[in-house]
Image (tube, rainbow, N blue to C red):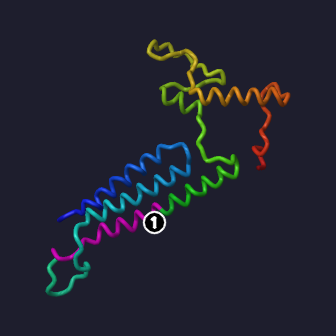
């Protein structure tokens, strides 16, 4: 069995680009990365199937070694259907996100950061519940600078609008938008 080096290289580039795009914050880029990884997987299955052969229909006088294995073809067809379904779902999520927030970037979530660090955020002041375990930091969570800047901007916007609690809803972000 010989594998085309060009197809193998194309598959590797598609996987690399797809994984890179899936690690981005933009949901549209995540979708494009998912599509690239799905197509690279189809190419991998095609390469592993081997060379072209006869149709897998049993007839007299045809050796089984000359036939193509139909399993990779069935797996590719199944992968195409699954990729289509997940892509349609992701496009619906992207569309809904765009309609509600007019952006497709994912936001930083305090609790996700806390979980990633091994603790759960308990309050808006970003403090942790003391556990009595000396190995767990009980000080305030340090959040990324981008999140802190967003919070400062929201506090400034709330102060400018005369809302001391910072509960004002920005235009276009109401419950019925």
As drawn, the residue found furthest toward the right would be 162
Q: Position of residue 156 (x, y in %)?
A: 76, 27
Going by the image, does 67 lie left or right of 169? left
In the foreground, 20 or 125: 20
Going by the image, does 134 lie left or right of 60? right
How would you classify the magenta stretch by its main secondary structure? helix
Secondary structure beneath label 1: helix
Tell me: residue 23, above or below residue 40: above
Start-end of magenta stretch? 65-83
- Residue at (51, 25) in percent of width and height: 119
Tell me: residue 164, above or below residue 59: above
In magenta segment, residue 68: yes
Q: Residues within 10 Å of mark 1 (few under 14, many from 20)?
A: few
Q: Position of residue 43 (x, y in %)?
A: 34, 62
Tell me: residue 154, above or below residue 101: above
Q: The N terminus is located in which quarter?
A: bottom left
Going by the image, does 132 lie left or right of 46? right
As drawn, the residue found furthest toward the bottom would be 60
In magenta segment, residue 161: no
- Residue at (20, 86) in percent of width and height: 59
Number of callouts in the render?
Answer: 1
Q: Position of residue 66 (x, y in %)?
A: 17, 76
- Residue at (47, 48) in percent of width and height: 21
In the foreground, 4 or 121: 4
Q: Position of residue 61 (x, y in %)?
A: 14, 86
Going by the image, does 102 lie left or right of 94? right
In the foreground, 152 or 95: 152
- Residue at (41, 58) in percent of width and height: 38
Location of mark 1 (residue):
81
């Amino acid at each position: 069995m010989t594998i085309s080096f060009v197809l193998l290289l194309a598959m590797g580039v598609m996987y690399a680009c797809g994984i890179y795009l899936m690690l981005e914050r933009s949901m549209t880029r995540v979708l494009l990365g998912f599509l690239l990884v799905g197509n690279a997987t189809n190419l991998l299955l095609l390469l592993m199937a081997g060379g072209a052969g006869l149709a897998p229909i049993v007839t007299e006088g045809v050796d089984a070694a000359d036939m193509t294995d139909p399993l990779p073809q069935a797996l590719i067809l199944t992968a195409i259907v699954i990729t289509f379904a997940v892509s349609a779902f992701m496009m619906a999520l992207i569309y809904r996100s765009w309609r509600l927030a007019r952006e497709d970037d994912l936001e930083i979530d305090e609790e996700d950061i806390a979980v990633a660090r091994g603790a759960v955020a308990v309050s808006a002041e970003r403090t942790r519940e003391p556990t009595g375990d000396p190995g767990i930091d009980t000080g305030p969570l340090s959040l990324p600078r981008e999140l802190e800047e967003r919070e400062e901007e929201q506090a400034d916007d709330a102060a400018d609008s005369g809302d001391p609690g910072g509960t004002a809803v920005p235009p276009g972000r109401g419950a019925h938008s």
